[in-house]
Amino acid sequence: MEIEENDAGGTTVILQAGDDLASIPDSHSHLLTPQLQAAFPDPVACFQQIAQKCPFPEMTRWLNALVEQSNWELQLHQGDPTEWTAAGYCWYSESVLGAIIDLPGTGACDYPKVLANYYSLVDSVRWNAFGYAGGLDGAGGHEPIRTFSYDYHGADVNPDDVSVWGWSLCGDMILWTADGRGGWMSHETGHIHLLGTIEETINWIYARLNDNEVPEYDYKWTQ
């Protein structure tokens, strides 16, 4: 087990195969969910099962690429303030872009069916290090886009029916709509670009990860 400072002003506990979960300090033990604990004896088998159940082709391909190299560690992050936390299995790969993947809890998601299905497989997926934006948020607490003051334009959507699903490093937002669509919004201009359905958006995001690229808003969309 290793303990190191992180870029969020706190500390991170890192565990690898053979480490003792009982040695996790009290400051971080609450981050070890039952799901993360159950997977620790064999994360490869756990994520192989997720890949087998996954209905999103690009996500399945990505998960299989991660487990093929079997290069993982369990990370428990706590920042400053201490309420700023994250946890999950961090997967490294030479062929695709790795990420920190949290596992879903037992609560039901009041989301469109395809998104609820997605969250039955994984919770948050972060392709940037803890302390930085960049990833898909977990199932809880998606902010309505109306929380943010923008001059919304571009795609034909009702901002009252749009929620923030994830972020790029620079603060652009990944969105989903109540009628089952998904896409991006520029944090600079409020321009909304839809990628298609939520399912198509999931595949678009994981296709970027498969190409070893960070998913980002493309400013050519505003032209």
Image: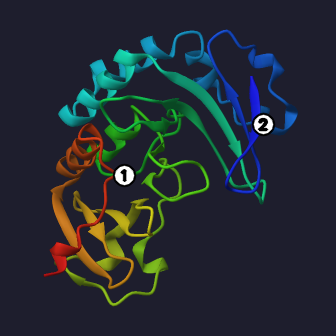
Above or below, 62 against 156 in this view is above
Which of these two is toward me, 9 or 183?
A: 9
Q: Position of residue 69 (x, y in %)?
A: 39, 17
Sequence-first disc among 1 and 2 = 2
The disc at residue 202 is none
Q: Amino acid at mark 2?
A: His
Residue shown at the point (35%, 29%) measured from the top left = 94
Question: Which residue corresponds to mark 1?
Answer: 111
Q: On the picture, is 57 further left or further right than 28?
A: left
Q: Secondary structure at mark 1?
A: loop
**Colour option used:** rainbow
Do the residues bearing badges 1 and 2 touch, measured as CB atoms within 8 Å? Answer: no
Question: Which residue corresponds to mark 2?
Answer: 28
Mark yes or no: residue 192 visible. Answer: yes
Q: Position of residue 139 (x, y in %)?
A: 47, 47
Above or below, 160 against 7 in this view is below
Residue shown at the point (38%, 69%) measured from the top left = 172
